[in-house]
Structure formats: structure tokens, C-alpha cells
Image (tube, helix red, strand yellow):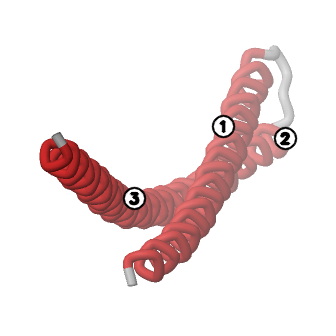
């Protein structure tokens, strides 16, 4: 019965480890997706600043074409809207990452619970085996003592 419980715990532990690994992979993918979105946002922000700087340089020129300046400002506004969309995506990806990390923490906690339970069962098993060995050793010692006592009694009767 105890061996069966240990096999069940071993199987359950494998399942919990697999679940934890799966949750860790999911969290890693979510983290990479968030980082990619942040890099995209940084690129858009850099392009926005470049558009503004270009429009500013055009305005500094003695003669400039207002349609070119207007086009740069329109492009900057377009990039600003893209930044807003990216920020919303980043917040959503951040929430998804938090959920994945919570799931990973929960899976790790469940795995540790099974590990502790398995360790406890192994210790109980080792203690049972130790007691059985001690009992067997005691029985052997008692049998030897009886044999010695019987031999002494038999030797004392012969004298």
C-alpha cells in the first residue's frame, strides 16, 4: 500500500513538474512578447522625434515649403496615435504577463507541496523499515539469548 502511494506521488510529481515547466514557457513567451512590443514602441517614438526634428530643421531654413512641414507634422501625429495604440498593447501584455507569472507561482507551489508530501512519505517508509529491521534484529538477539541460555542450562545439568 505504501509503495502504491509513493508511485502515485511520483506520477503526480511528474505531472506537477510538467505543468510548472509549461507555465514557465508561457511566462517566457509573454515576457518576450512584451519586450518586443516595448522595442516597437521605442522605434516608433524615435521615428516621431526624428519627424519633429526634421520639421524643426525645415522651419529654420530661410525658404521652406509649408506642405513638407505640414506632412512631417501629420506624420508625427500619426506616430503619436501609433504610440497610444502601442501603450495600450503594452499594458495589456503586461497584465497577461502578470497572470502567467501568477500561474507559474501557483504551479510551483503545487509542485513543492507534492515534493514535501513525497519526502514525508519516504521518511515514514524509512522509519517503518528501520523499525522492522530493529524488530528483526531484536528477535535474532532474543533467539540467540534463548539458545545460549538453553545451552548453559543443558551444560549445567550435565555437570
- Which numbered disc, 2 or 3, marks the residue closer to the eye? 3
Left/right placement of residue 92 relative to residue 113 reads right
Residue identifier under label 3: 115
Quarter of the image that includes the C terminus: top left
Sequence-wise, the earlier of marks 2 and 3 is 2
Mark 1 Cα shell of 10 Å, populated few (<14), some (14-19), many (≥20) = some
Q: Is label 1 in a helix, a strand or a loop?
A: helix
Give the Cα separation between the discs numbered 3 and 1: 44 Å
Left/right placement of residue 131 relative to residue 70 reads left
Q: Is residue 34 visible?
A: yes
* Residue 110 in picture, x, y percent from top left: 37, 66
Q: Is label 3 in a helix, a strand or a loop?
A: helix
Mark 2 Cα shell of 10 Å, populated few (<14), some (14-19), many (≥20) = some
Residue identifier under label 2: 68
Q: Residue at x 74, y 16 (%)?
A: 60
Q: Is label 2 in a helix, a strand or a loop?
A: helix
Q: Is residue 121 above or below residue 127?
A: below
In front of the other: 154 or 33 = 154
Q: Are marks 3 and 1 in contact (CB under 8 Å)?
A: no
In front of the other: 52 or 149 = 149
Left/right placement of residue 8 relative to residue 32 reads left
Give the Cα separation between the discs numbered 1 and 2: 25 Å
* Residue 19 in picture, x, y percent from top left: 55, 70
Q: Residue at x 41, y 79 (%)?
A: 5
Quarter of the image that includes the N terminus: bottom left
* Residue 38 in picture, x, y percent from top left: 62, 44
Q: Which mark is residue 42?
A: 1
- Which numbered disc, 1 or 2, marks the residue closer to the eye? 1
Q: Is residue 130 visible?
A: no
Sequence-wise, the earlier of marks 3 and 1 is 1
* Residue 99 in picture, x, y percent from top left: 42, 65
Amino acid at each position: 500500500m505504501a509503495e502504491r502511494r509513493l508511485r502515485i506521488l511520483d506520477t503526480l510529481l511528474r505531472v506537477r513538474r510538467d505543468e510548472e515547466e509549461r507555465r514557465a514557457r508561457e511566462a517566457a513567451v509573454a515576457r518576450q512578447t512584451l519586450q518586443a512590443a516595448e522595442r516597437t514602441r521605442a522605434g516608433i517614438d524615435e521615428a516621431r522625434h526624428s519627424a519633429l526634428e526634421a520639421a524643426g530643421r525645415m522651419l529654420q531654413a530661410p525658404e521652406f515649403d509649408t506642405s513638407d512641414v505640414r506632412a512631417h507634422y501629420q506624420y508625427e501625429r500619426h506616430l503619436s496615435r501609433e504610440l497610444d495604440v502601442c501603450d495600450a498593447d503594452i499594458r495589456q501584455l503586461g497584465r497577461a504577463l502578470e497572470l502567467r507569472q501568477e500561474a507559474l507561482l501557483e504551479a510551483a507551489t503545487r509542485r513543492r507541496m507534492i515534493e514535501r508530501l513525497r519526502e514525508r512519505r519516504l521518511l515514514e517508509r524509512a522509519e517503518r523499515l528501520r523499525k522492522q529491521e530493529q524488530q528483526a534484529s531484536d528477535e535474532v538477539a532474543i533467539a540467540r539469548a534463548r539458545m545460549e541460555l538453553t545451552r548453559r542450562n543443558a551444560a549445567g545439568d550435565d555437570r
